[in-house]
Image (cartoon, rainbow, N blue to C red):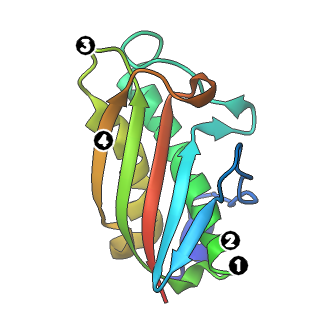
Amino acid sequence: MSIEARLKKLGVTLPDAPAPAANYVPWVKTGNLLFVSGQISANSDGFITGKLGETMTAEEGAEAAKSCAISLLAQLKAGCDGDIERLVRVVKLVGFVNSTPEFGDQPKVINGCSDFMVEALGDKGRHSRSAVSAASLPFGVAVEIEAIFEIA
């Protein structure tokens, strides 16, 4: 099944790739790798903000991480000149969780992104990753995730 068909089956329409918020580019292509800058948790209502362990649960954080996954795929599509089917595989995700010092479920939060990647991309979505705590993130968002993709 194509990636576009899988997304449609999941009821997901990729938005236009978000524009960068500062002096950087949203993605860089080198050889067969596409490096996507960190995508922050947001939906149609705006930024998904909060601090895990204080104002958000791990489950709410996982939903925020899923929103990052959708933005990452939008950037991937843009980086592939609109042809997301050029994806060979997700290589690596690096997830940052806005959390209290006591919060220890960063992996559960980033699972929201990882699980969606596998659900939407099948085996191409399996990846290596890091899930780390951050004292704060831009605009007070709950999650930020960057990615490396292999493309054809």
Of pointers 4 and 1, the one earlier in the residue sequence = 1
Which residue is nearer to you in this view: 85 or 8?
A: 85
Distance of mark 3 from mark 2, alpha carbons? 38 Å
Q: Disc 2, disc 1: CB below 8 Å?
A: yes
Horizontally, residue 116 falls left or right of residue 8, namely left
The disc label shown at residue 131, or none: 4
Which residue is nearer to you in this view: 6 or 140?
A: 140
Going by the numbered disc 3, the residue's amino acid type is: Glu
Is 134 located above or below residue 19 in the figure? above
Local SS, label 1: loop
Tell me the residue at 74%/52% (across/down).
19
Tell me the residue at 40%/31% (across/down).
97
Q: Position of residue 152 (x, y in %)?
A: 49, 90
Going by the numbered disc 4, the residue's amino acid type is: Ala
Of pointers 3 and 2, the one earlier in the residue sequence = 2
Q: List the residue tagged with mark 1.
A: 82
Distance of mark 2 from mark 1, alpha carbons? 5 Å
Q: List the residue tagged with mark 2.
A: 78
Is 52 located above or below residue 48 in the figure? above
Local SS, label 4: strand
Local SS, label 2: helix
Give residue 28's quadrant in the image.
bottom right
Going by the numbered disc 1, the residue's amino acid type is: Gly
